[in-house]
Image (cartoon, helix red, strand yellow):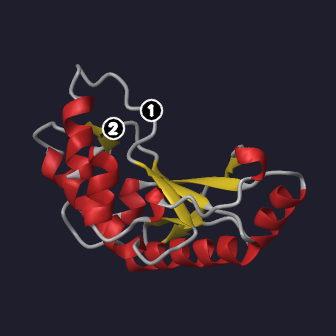
Amino acid sequence: NDVCAAIKALGSDSLLKASFNFTDGAVRGINLVPLPTGWVNGQVVNQFPGEEHIIYYKSVGFNAIRLPISWEAAQPALMGALDSAYLSDLKQFLAKAEAQGVPVMVEVHNYDRYRGKLVGSPEVPGAAFQDLWRRLADALKDQKIVYGYGLMNEPHDTNGTWQTFAQYGVN
């Protein structure tokens, strides 16, 4: 399908791999969210969950993590570079998950919006969503522990545009 082909074309076939050992085929996942922990230089600082969280949830039977990320934190300016500190923190989290053998789904958690503006609006063109996913896919292409991507959490009130602009994310 288009999603798999687009991600593979961008250099990451993690979504296509069946190499994760989900006991009895069931994925028992948990959301572990990078949380705001304060302000530095007028910006919210997000702290990714620690390895102790991964260890604990693995010990009680979870075998996968869904990691919601913020578009604004990952890419502070539309069509701009990914934030190097945020990306570094994301990759450190993925390394901790890999050390524990717990696969991660990375998902943009923005409800089809950037800074409150709908994707596909004049303020947030579809090309900006495409740019975000090109940059994320390129940045994460070597992260073997990533078993999938969530284009966008719960797009809502899109006036029927989500299907069109979702395709921008995979093109």
Whether pointer 2 and pointer 1 mark residues with C-beta atoms closer than 8 Å, the reply is: yes
Q: Residue furthest right?
A: 60
Q: Considering the numbered disc 1 on the image, is that residue within a helix, a strand or a loop?
A: loop
Q: Quadrant of the N terminus?
A: top left
Q: Considering the numbered disc 2 on the image, is that residue within a helix, a strand or a loop?
A: loop
Q: Is residue 160 above or below residue 137?
A: above
Residue 119 appears anywhere in the view: no
Is residue 29 rendered to the left or right of residue 75?
Answer: right
Q: Nearer the viewer, residue 99 or 25?
A: 25
| Residue 164 quadrant | top left
The residue carrying mark 1 is: 154
Estimate the x, y position of residue 137 in percent, counting from the top left: 34, 66
- At label 1, counting other C-alpha atoms closer than 10 Å, the crowd grade (few under 14, some 14-19, many 20 or more) is few
Estimate the x, y position of residue 15 in percent, counting from the top left: 46, 57
Estimate the x, y position of residue 53 in percent, counting from the top left: 79, 63
User: What is the number of the mark on residue 112?
Assistant: 2
Estimate the x, y position of residue 35 in percent, counting from the top left: 61, 57
Q: Amino acid at mark 2?
A: Asp
Is residue 22 rendered to the left or right of residue 104?
Answer: right
Q: Nearer the viewer, residue 95 or 11?
A: 11
User: What is the number of the mark on residue 126?
Assistant: none
Label 2 vs label 1: CA separation?
A: 7 Å
